[in-house]
Image: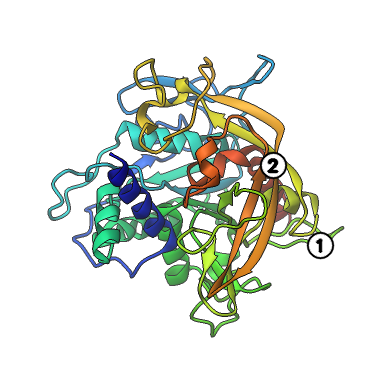
Amino acid sequence: MKPLIAAVVAGLLIAAAGAPPATAGDPLADPVWLCKPGMPANPCNQDASGNPVESPGLVRYPDGGVVTLDSTLTGGQVEHFVSEPDPPVDCFYVYPTVDLVANPLLQLGSIPPAARPNEAAVMFAQAAQFTGQCRMFAPLYRQATLPDLAVGTILGADAYLGPGFADVRQAWDYYWQHDNLDPRTGQRRGVILLGHSQGSVAIERLIQSSIDGNPDVTRQLVSAVLLGGAVQVPTGGVAGGGDDPDSTFQHLPLCRRGSGLQVPVGCVVAYSSYTPAAGTAPGSGTLAWSNKPGHQIACVNPAALLRGDDAGTTTSLDAYMPTRSLVQGNLLNPNGHLALVLLGYNLMDYATGFAHYPSTLTGQCRYAPGAGGSSSWLHITGGDFLPASASTSPLGLHVADYNLTLSNLKALLTAQSTAWKAHP
């Protein structure tokens, strides 16, 4: 079993770190959506305007099972999910690698994927909290599976053969042409891009091909949150400048903010989270490592950015971890639909969808040069709910990247949306 787990972990690293562009496949007849405002039986519980169809804070699995986005504090108090009426901006979210078998099982022609519980579970855990502040668009895509990535790693082959990234681009093109125009005002809406792991790499490719350097789109970009995706920037810099093939983006910058300045918009928030032992740093083969001369992996601490602190400031973090209820766990399978992804995590058995840990963790963007490269990561301390194995894992806290700063991200994206609306 240990060799299999090691192979899957290695495959996840390939998914996040990037690979050659996917080969073209037969396109879907139409985009397929996990969540889309106004769609029948929308798992994200939003009508066409982004308002709750049922009670606020409910989300629904493809099989009809309902879970809540409310949270429980460590003292037992329950915090109810709050939804802003008529959310003024949109979110476009691409989920990470969660498929153990292909979706659809028969990868022929343009057979479309269908929503599965594991895809819904990871979407609920990472991004459903944002449905209180944006209309949520989340496409299904024919992603590279966990075994695909493991085999690709072992054989040194392209792990991304398949149509998954083309599916994401098709969904984005449909959204941009049909849904980004506000039907009430006729004006384009602001949009937040959200991705993780393979989903972040998909959005990185989308930005490179359709957004970076395109003012018609970038002026609508509120923020791009690309976690666990190994975004490369010049050492100490924010973007490639137009002629840097080793930088992920040429013009779209990392989010930076000086003291007293307005929160920035139209920029990138990116990091991979680790909790290495004292005096050590994530090394070669991790998501924090760059072997590109003069470059580093991007790290933006959303809590520091929101406060206007220096990029390397140590800040308190506000974590929301999924519970057994959210992932539909039970005594035999406590981590439910995310059992394979959340190996080593002990989820709380609360009736609410989240366990809230305010000011339990601290985070700091750190940089460490090494032989043949450098490491850059969001350094996490504290939290007895985190697995001890994370300190030595090449993935670190990868699967919890969003949850470790989820409340900070919500506050940051609210501030960025407000700033964008003031000067669209």
Secondary element under disc 2, as helix, strand or loop, is helix
Secondary element under disc 1, as helix, strand or loop, is loop
Residue on which disc 2 sits: 411
Task: Name the residue at 66% across, 14% down.
Answer: 76
Task: Name the residue at 30% across, 51% down.
Answer: 143
Residue 388 horizontal/vertical position (percent): 54, 36
Residue 174 horizontal/vertical position (percent): 37, 55
How many residues crowd mark 1 within 10 Å: few (<14), some (14–19), many (20+)? some
Going by the picture, which residue comes out furthest to the bottom?
Answer: 243
**Mark 1 or mark 2, earlier in chain:** 1
Q: Nearer the viewer, residue 149 or 407?
A: 149
Quadrant location of the N terminus in the rendered image: top left
Residue 343 horizontal/vertical position (percent): 42, 35
Quadrant location of the C terminus in the rendered image: bottom right
What's the residue type where badge 1 is placed?
Gly
Q: Is residue 237 left or right of residue 293?
A: right
What's the residue type where badge 2 is placed?
Ala
Q: Nearer the viewer, residue 114 or 198?
A: 198
Residue on which disc 1 sits: 258
Going by the picture, which residue comes out furthest to the right?
Answer: 260
Q: State whether residue 93 is above or below residue 79.
A: below
Residue 40 horizontal/vertical position (percent): 34, 31
- Report whether residue 72 is seen: yes
